[in-house]
Every structure is written in structure tokens, then in C-alpha cells.
């Protein structure tokens, strides 16, 4: 108690103008109490400035005040380390609107590094999130983890070592992820159960899977749609999948460039996708048993156009490796071929439209395509009837550009 | 059974001086309760006659829950205050609708030897939930070593606590007072602070008042605290999780999960995005965990496939996370540093006996 009082006294408060103040926090033995104190005492409009240095934190922090900016002195100068964390399921939890985090690093969180739940107009800029021991199943699941948010801007961040996804946006709408680096994670960038996302000019490399666009059943928000993935470099995703089994990303084969599972209206264009040992692009249905009658397991209305493809399929992993060993060459673009799925015991079929066009292969010619011909989602690969004929090209209208009020 | 006994004892301690209220005594400080700024000291609210908060003021009524959240075995002393003339409105399912001015008081305490929970009791902290005009606010107060005052402490350093637990084992831990935001981590409904415990099913049981045992719903109605309640026989009643005589194994396990997990794991709570709904009234086995796959659990899944793998407690993520002390894995995320051995045994037994559809004999 005395410690907490002392901590507050050590906070420096600058009155900038009448209704916006700047708090200054410095590293020290009371850093956890100091920072959490600032998070609680801040008022809307305030900025909390983190001086340079390492902050050794023993507990997770949480921010529940709207319109607060947390700003460090740069991703290599201001480091919040959770190496000694003994409390809290994440490094920092944000539950307020109009929050900006920028210019600092979060290292070695015991769970997720930065989680934002139910936030509007969230900005995460120039952050570094890292598990410093390299890829390990003991690392936290997500680096940056907005869930149930609207108007999310993530830019110029770098995330390394997450045992699930480095940058993960789930059950959210209106999302921009750009100019960021995701490497040495299980999944580099994952957009899941979300509506309207633009993912562009990122580097996703050295993950098990580079960029994932997923939709899962049984969740409050599902039916993911309207996702544009463009001008990214999705290259050399070759870190062996280190996700704890049981999680959906544990099923992503090592060496996957881009993977689309379920979802509709996903447009992938003008990316560089190469050096992914299993497949550059995979388009697949959700394969597990579905108890949820409102869920659609099929990826549909998918456009893959004007991308540059590098090498693919040279080191297949997972059950696709067996297929490759059986003599089926893995292509640049792999589709499971599912047009039927079973939800709550009822089979449903629908035409799956695709527009695969104007792509080119670095080594010349067109990227290869293969449908596995597994027409019912979740069926065994033993039932595969591989077919290299691409589906007829359908011109599918592109989702509108995402516009954010804070951008 | 042990916990039921304990609850009774606490009730006796808490209610000991209830009849001592006189018309000369200062009333509960309504102005302090409605102020935007927290009072510096707990005693400023005058919820108790004495600064040590052992003797509740007039209108401050002790209560207990049949099954309570595990908090490292801490004693919990609960009181409700509803302003004179106002009443809480009974609801069958959710938390009662309390009027502006209501206070819910919960003191966390340890006896030096928890086998004698009435002796050498040290108060650690007292948490208030106050119903103000704009909604509920949470205020933590931390007790001094002399037990003479509890001071408002929005962020606290850990407090060393040592005690002999109910099994006779010496325990030492650093008690972590939740900060204001962590209060909301559990007490959250659609982003607003809300009480958790005072629901019909949790209160519909006997309580040892100073003047004798009485059903709490009946007593609250008689005291004029509660309006619209039916006779206790017509209200829902949760079993006591650890008393086999009070309900089936499934009902008791579901009650345990309801009390310990459902404050987050409900369709409006912080864990809604997981899709796991552990409210006792949720009757969809897939939604309360049967063969439900993890969504965002990451390493916390422990490599297991399902929240509940019927017949296989050892393969169930639910048990794995209840059994963990790793902050990135453990459930609940906050509020415990030790395992609830009794709760684990109950949930393990329930899952072990469960058939593929989630039913137990």
C-alpha cells in the first residue's frame, strides 16, 4: 500500500493544456505499480510517455480509459519485459476506445502480448513484440490481438515468436494491417471471423504459415468476408510449426504462404509469394465436425490475381507430404475442391466461384494449380481425386477499400 | 460440507452485532457512497459501527452464497446495504436489479489457522461495489497491519499472507489485490461493471443470522430489501457444489463452473469471444465445452483437443487450465495462486463419468 502511494508520487505529470495531460513514467523497481497507476488515473485525452529503458513487470497491465495514448521512445529504446510475470493472462489488456499505443516493445509475455477487446478506433503503431528465446510452444499465443473491435489500425509493427499468430485480428470489423513485419511465428498475420480487412505491404516470412484468412464455427461473430490481401511479401515461411496441438493453427502445414479457410470475398492481388515449401496459396474448407447450423465451412468468391509466384511445393509438410510422396506434385495454388459441407448433421452444397487470373511465375509461365477434388469438406485425403484444371475464371467485384476514422 | 460449515461460522461472526443498531448511531454515509471520488477510508462510509468493520451498521445485512468463487481459500464476509425506502427487484435468472445507493461489501480474510476460522482473523481487503446513478463502481480498500483502517488502494503491491489451510498445511502467498481494472475483468457485462453473486439461485438457501437461521430470499423480502420475490420453494436454487446431498454430480459441477467461470464465460462477459458459455442455465453441451475445440487458447490448451473430452478428465482443457498455476495458462486468469483441490476433484469426477453426449448418470 505504501509502495503504491510512493509510486503515484513518483509519476510526473505535465499539464500540457487544460484538458489533456502528459504523464511521464520511468523504469524502476515499482514500474508495474507506476504504470498501472497511470493507466487507472489517466483521463480521456491524456498521453502516457514511457522513458527509454527496460521495464521489468511482474503483472499484466490493463487500460480501460478512452482516448489515451501510450508512447515510448522507440521500439528498441523503451522495452516492457514480462519475463518475470506472475500474474495476468496477457501483457497489456486494452478495453477502451480511441487508444493509441506506439513506439515501444513488449517482450516475453506469459500469454498474449497486447490484447484489445471490444475497442473502437484502436491504433497500434511502431511496436515491437517479441519472444526473445525464439520460436517455442511455451511462448504466448498472440503478439497483437484485437478481438471484437471495430476500426483497427496496425502499422509498422514487428512481431516475432508467437506460438499462434504474430498479428491476429479476430471477430472484428474494419481493419487495416500494413507496413509490418511478422516473422518466426506459427502464423505471421491472421484475420479470423472478421469483416472488411485490408492487409497490405507487409512482410510475412520465416513463419510456419505467412498470412491466414480463417473463419471458425461456434463463435459470436462468424461468416468472415471482404478481405483484401495485396502488395505483401509472403516469402520463405519455413519455421517448423511449433503451435501446441489442438489449436487450429497447429494444422497449418509448415511452408504455407497464404491460407484461406472458409470466408467469402477474399481478394489476393499484387503480392510476391514464393519459397514456401508446401504451397504458396491454399484455399480450403474447415475440416472438423460442425455443430453450428449457421456456419458455412467453404471458402467462396475467391480472387487470386496479378501475383508473382516463386518456388513452391519443394518441401511439403503435414498430410500433404504423404500426397506428394504418392506422386501428386504440389502446386502454387492448392484448393481442396470442397463444394459440400455438413453443418449440424445437414449436408449443404453450393457453387464455389473463383477468379484465378493474371498471375505469373518467376521462373516463367503460369503458376500451377491443383484441386484435390475432396468434394465434401472434412473428408479424408484418401478420397482425393486431384485435378490440375483451374476452375473457370469468374470476375468477382472487389470489396471496397477499408477506411478508418483515425487514419 | 466444510465450506458450508465455514459459511455458517462467518455468518455468525458477521451478524453478531446486527441487533446493536440504535437510532442514535450515525447512519450509513449516503453522500460518500454517491460521490464520484472514492472516500479515502472504508470507515468514511459508516457501513460499520467500528473502524475494524466487525459490526455492521443498521440496514447492512450479511449474506452468503451456497457455492463461492475459489480465492486461495480466503474467508469472504459479505454484506448488502440498500438505502432506506428503496428495494432491489427480484429476477429469476440474473443478478437482482439493485437501486441506486446500494452497496455490496466483500471482505477477504484469513484466519491464522483456517481450521479455526473464527479465531485470529486478519482482514486483507474489503471490496465495495456501489450502485451509483451512472452504474456500478468498484472500490478496493486494503487493511493496515493493525487492522484499524482500510484505505482506498486502486493499485496495490502484493501483500504477504501466511496461514494454516483447512487441511492443516502451512501456506504462504503474496495476496494480490485486484486493481480497479482487474475488478472489471470479472465484474463486466457488455463493458459495464456489474455484480456477480447476488442471484436467486445463489441466495436461495439458509443463512445463520444472529437471531436464527432463515432463508435469505425470505429474509431479504421480510426486511424490505427485495421486492417481487416468490416463496423460496418457487425460486431457483443452486446446489452446494461440495455437498452430494444437495444435488446431482452434474448439477453440482455445473454450479461450480457457473460460480467460478461464468462471470467471464457468458454471452455478455469478457470471455464471450471464446464461444465457451459456462452458465449453469446453458443447456447446449457443445457451448459448455463438450468436444469444443479451442479458439484462441494458444499454449494454454496444453496440446489437448477439447475443452471437455467426455469420459476423459485428463484430456480436457478445462481441467488442464484449472490445474495450472502458470499465468498464461491458468483459469480463472485472476484471483488465485493455488489450486482448488476440491473443485478439481469435483470437475474431474464429473467429466470422467460423462457419456459422449455430455450426460452423467
Image (cartoon, coloured by chain):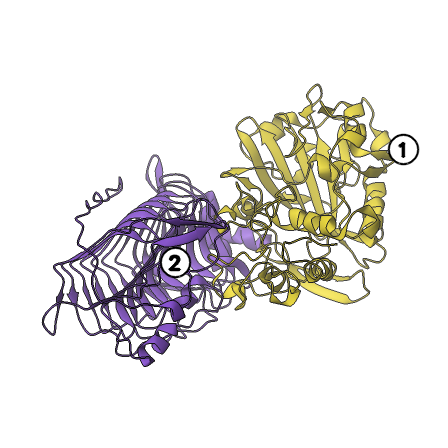
Chain colours: A purple, B yellow
Work out which residue is located at the far right of the displayed protein and give it.
B212
Q: How many marks?
A: 2
Cβ–Cβ under 8 Å for marks 1 and 2: no
| Residue corresponding to mark 1 | B211
Q: Position of residue A198 (x, y in %)?
A: 25, 50
Whether residue A320 is situated above or below residue A359 in the rendered picture: below
Q: Nearer the viewer, residue B347 or B209?
A: B347
At mark 1, the secondary structure is: loop
Residue at left offset 71%, top offset 60%: B353
Q: Are marks 1 and 2 on the same chain?
A: no
| Residue corresponding to mark 2 | A376
* Residue A175 as seen in the image, left or right of residue B126: left
Residue A9 appears in view = no
Q: Which mark's residue is nearer the viewer, 1 or 2?
A: 2
At mark 2, the secondary structure is: loop
Q: Chain of mark 1?
A: B
Q: Position of residue A11 (x, y in %)?
A: 44, 51
Q: Chain of mark 2?
A: A
- Identify the image quadrant of the C terminus of chain B: bottom right
Amino acid at each position: 500500500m505504501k509502495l503504491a502511494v510512493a509510486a503515484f508520487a513518483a509519476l510526473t505529470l505535465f499539464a500540457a493544456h487544460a484538458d489533456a495531460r502528459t504523464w511521464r513514467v520511468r523504469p524502476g523497481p515499482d514500474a508495474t505499480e507506476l504504470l498501472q497507476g497511470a493507466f487507472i488515473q489517466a483521463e480521456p485525452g491524456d498521453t502516457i510517455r514511457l522513458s527509454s529503458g527496460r521495464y521489468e513487470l511482474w503483472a499484466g497491465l490493463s487500460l480501460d480509459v478512452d482516448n489515451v495514448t501510450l508512447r515510448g521512445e522507440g521500439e528498441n529504446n523503451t522495452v516492457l519485459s514480462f519475463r518475470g510475470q506472475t500474474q495476468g493472462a496477457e501483457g497489456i489488456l486494452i478495453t477502451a476506445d480511441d487508444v493509441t499505443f506506439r513506439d515501444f516493445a513488449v517482450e516475453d509475455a506469459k500469454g498474449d502480448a497486447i490484447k484489445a477487446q471490444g475497442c473502437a478506433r484502436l491504433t497500434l503503431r511502431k511496436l515491437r513484440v517479441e519472444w526473445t528465446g525464439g520460436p517455442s510452444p511455451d511462448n504466448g499465443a498472440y503478439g497483437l490481438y484485437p478481438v471484437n473491435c471495430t476500426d483497427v489500425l496496425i502499422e509498422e509493427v514487428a512481431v516475432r515468436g508467437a506460438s499462434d499468430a504474430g498479428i491476429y485480428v479476430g471477430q472484428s470489423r474494419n481493419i487495416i494491417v500494413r507496413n509490418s513485419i511478422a516473422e518466426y511465428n506459427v502464423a505471421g498475420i491472421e484475420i479470423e471471423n472478421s469483416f472488411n480487412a485490408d492487409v497490405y505491404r507487409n512482410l510475412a516470412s520465416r513463419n510456419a504459415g505467412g498470412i491466414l484468412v480463417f473463419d471458425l464455427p461456434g463463435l459470436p461473430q462468424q461468416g468472415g468476408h471482404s478481405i483484401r490481401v495485396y502488395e505483401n511479401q509472403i516469402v520463405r515461411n519455413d519455421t517448423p510449426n511449433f503451435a501446441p496441438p489442438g489449436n487450429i493453427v497447429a494444422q497449418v502445414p509448415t511452408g504455407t504462404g497464404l491460407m484461406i479457410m472458409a470466408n467469402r470475398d477474399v481478394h489476393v492481388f499484387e503480392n510476391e509469394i514464393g519459397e514456401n515449401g508446401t504451397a504458396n496459396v491454399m484455399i480450403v474448407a474447415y475440416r472438423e465436425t460442425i455443430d453450428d447450423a449457421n456456419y458455412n465451412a467453404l471458402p467462396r468468391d475467391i480472387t487470386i490475381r496479378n501475383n508473382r509466384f516463386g518456388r513452391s511445393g519443394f518441401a511439403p509438410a503435414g498430410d500433404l507430404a504423404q500426397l506428394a510422396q504418392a506422386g501428386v506434385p504440389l502446386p502454387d495454388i492448392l484448393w481442396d475442391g470442397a463444394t459440400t459441407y455438413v453443418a449440424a448433421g445437414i449436408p449443404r452444397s453450393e457453387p464455389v466461384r473463383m477468379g484465378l487470373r493474371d498471375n505469373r511465375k518467376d521462373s516463367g509461365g503460369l503458376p500451377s494449380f491443383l484441386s484435390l477434388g475432396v468434394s465434401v469438406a472434412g473428408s479424408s485425403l484418401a478420397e482425393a481425386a486431384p485435378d490440375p484444371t483451374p476452375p473457370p475464371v469468374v470476375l468477382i467485384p472487389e470489396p471496397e477499400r477499408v477506411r478508418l476514422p483515425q487514419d | 460440507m466444510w465450506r458450508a460449515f465455514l459459511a455458517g461460522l462467518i455468518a455468525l461472526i458477521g451478524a453478531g452485532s446486527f441487533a446493536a443498531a440504535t437510532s442514535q448511531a450515525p447512519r450509513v454515509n449516503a453522500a460518500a457512497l454517491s460521490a464520484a471520488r472514492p472516500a479515502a477510508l472504508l470507515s468514511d462510509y459508516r457501513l460499520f459501527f467500528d473502524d475494524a468493520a466487525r459490526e455492521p451498521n443498521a440496514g447492512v445485512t450479511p449474506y452468503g452464497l451456497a457455492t463461492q468463487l475459489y480465492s486461495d481459500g480466503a474467508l469472504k464476509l459479505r454484506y448488502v446495504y440498500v438505502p432506506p425506502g428503496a428495494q432491489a427487484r427480484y429476477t429469476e435468472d440474473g443478478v437482482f436489479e439493485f437501486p441506486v445507493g446500494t452497496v455490496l461489501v466483500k471482505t477477504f480474510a484469513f484466519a491464522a489457522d483456517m481450521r479455526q476460522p473464527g479465531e485470529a482473523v486478519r482482514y486483507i481487503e474489503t471490496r465495495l461495489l456501489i450502485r451509483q446513478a451512472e452504474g456500478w463502481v468498484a472500490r478496493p480498500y486494503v487493511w493496515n497491519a493493525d487492522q484499524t483502517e482500510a484505505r482506498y488502494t486502486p493499485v496495490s503491491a502484493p501483500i504477504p499472507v501466511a496461514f494454516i489451510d483447512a487441511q492443516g498445511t502451512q501456506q504462504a502467498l503474496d495476496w494480490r489485490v485486484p486493481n480497479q481494472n482487474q475488478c472489471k475483468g470479472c465484474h463486466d457485462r457488455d463493458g459495464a461493471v456489474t455484480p456477480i453473486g447476488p442471484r436467486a439461485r445463489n441466495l436461495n438457501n439458509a443463512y445463520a443470522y444472529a437471531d436464527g437461521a432463515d432463508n435469505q430470499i425470505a429474509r431479504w423480502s421480510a426486511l424490505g430489501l427485495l421486492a417481487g420475490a416468490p416463496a423460496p420453494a418457487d425460486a431457483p436454487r443452486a446446489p452446494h457444489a461440495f455437498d452430494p446431498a444437495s444435488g446431482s454430480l452434474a448439477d453440482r459441477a455445473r454450479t461450480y463452473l457457473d460460480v467460478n467461470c461464468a462471470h467471464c464465460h457468458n454471452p455478455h462477459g469478457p470471455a464471450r469471444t471464446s464461444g465457451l458459455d459456462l452458465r449453469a442455465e446453458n443447456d447446449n453441451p457443445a457451448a459448455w465445452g463438450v468436444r469444443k475445440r479451442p479458439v484462441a487458447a494458444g499454449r494454454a490448451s496444453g496440446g489437448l483437443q477439447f475443452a471437455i473430452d467426455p469420459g476423459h478428465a485428463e484430456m480436457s482443457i478445462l481441467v488442464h487450465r484449472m490445474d495450472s498455476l502458470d499465468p498464461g495458462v491458468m483459469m480463472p486468469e485472476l484471483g488465485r495462486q493455488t489450486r482448488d483441490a476440491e473443485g478439481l476433484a469435483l470437475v474431474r469426477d464429473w467429466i470422467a463419468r460423462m457419456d459422449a453426449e455430455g450426460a452423467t448418470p
